[in-house]
Image: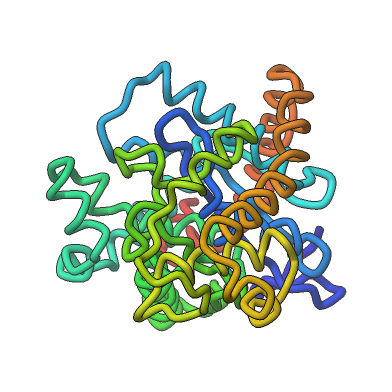
Amino acid sequence: MTMTHSGQDPSGRKRVFSGIQPTGDGELHLGNLIGALENWVRMQDEYETYYCVVDLHAMTSPYDPKILDQARLTTAKTLLAIGVDPRRSLFYLQSQVPQHAELAWILGTITSIGQLERMTQFKEKADRSGQNLGLLAYPVLMAADIVLHRANAVPVGDDQTQHLELTRDLVQRFNGRFGDVFPLPDRISPPVGARVMSLQDPTAKMSKSDLDPDSRVNLLDSPDVVRKKLKSAVTDSDRTVRYDWSEKPGIANLLEIFSVCGGRPIPDLVAEFGEAGYGRFKEAVAESVVARLTPIRTRFKSLEDQEVGRIMLKGALDARSRAESTMVAVRRAVGLTGS
């Protein structure tokens, strides 16, 4: 499809890019689904969507190569099961499109070390895993991921806002120095559930890196496991169900999960369960989550590994071709055209 430098196709649809890491065993959790992935599926109807399993990012922390290889497949299968449609979205593995790394190097030459060292995620991960160049340069690669396809918008959670701001800064710096090549990407975020919190510590986000498996609901968890985890979710001593993040973060978190999975407004849920007690409330939350995840688990099991591999390779070949059109303009702008 012919694209302008603004990142819009001739019909006027905006282009959206987003990626997700295949961390751990590659299994995604409810926070991923509510915070970003449901939005991915919806946006396929409105935008030209580019979705990527960002496996190069996963290499910035210690990992087992065999586990990473399987995790990439599991993540891709889960995204397909959720509803990412390769007929409507460009869907591929980051490492199979070398222009991501090439553009990251070019953007790295206009990025200050001070900017990268101030990144909250770098400070947190460096303390846990030790510092390495990949971890420091992670936001530059993320910026390259976004602008390689000249995206207008990026669906990101609260924890990635700082990285998107760096991307916007680099776009402005690049365009100011070398000419108008990239559009300035905006943030897209769902109105409810943008950041799902841990079931065991509602002051921290739900995360795969949390050592407590009961802190999160994985998308491939069985119904019994989902019920058990939500039954044990941390709340408080007060038995009233109300939406109050300052006084009742555990209940507020469960209300947001219930609202998104059950498709009901939070005020309606509070009116029904306000005085019902935590036991009945948690059971209802659990059943809404089970109902939401059952089609995903069923679809995941139906996907064959070889079929998914073919889908990802086809997407990568298409992504390389489209990315190269951007890189021709970038190389020309920065003086790498040759003769």
What colour-coding does the image apply?
rainbow
List x then y, in percent, for residue 171. Answer: 44, 74
Task: Give me the residue at 54% from left, 56% from top.
Answer: 279
Near-viewer residue (164 or 213): 213
Q: Position of residue 61 (x, y in %)?
A: 27, 37
The residue shown at (54%, 75%) is 187
Viewer can see residue 188: no
- Residue name at image x 35 percent, y 72 percent: 162
Q: Classify 140 as above or below 115.
A: above
In front here: 246 or 143?
A: 246
Seen in the image, is 165 located left or right of residue 154? left
62 up-or-down from 256: above or below:
above
**Relative height, residue 206 to residue 186 (above, below):** above
Residue positioned 49% across, 75% down in the render: 240
In this rendering, position of residue 241 left or right of residue 4: left
Frontmost residue, 98 versus 292: 292
Residue 25, given in percent of the width and then of the height, sits at 45, 28
Toward the right, the furthest residue is 11
Q: Could you tell me which quadrant the N terminus lies in?
A: bottom right
**Residue 133's x, y, as percent?**
20, 46
Q: Nearer the viewer, residue 104 or 293?
A: 293
Q: How many marks?
A: 0
Could one spot residue 201 in this view of the protein?
Answer: yes
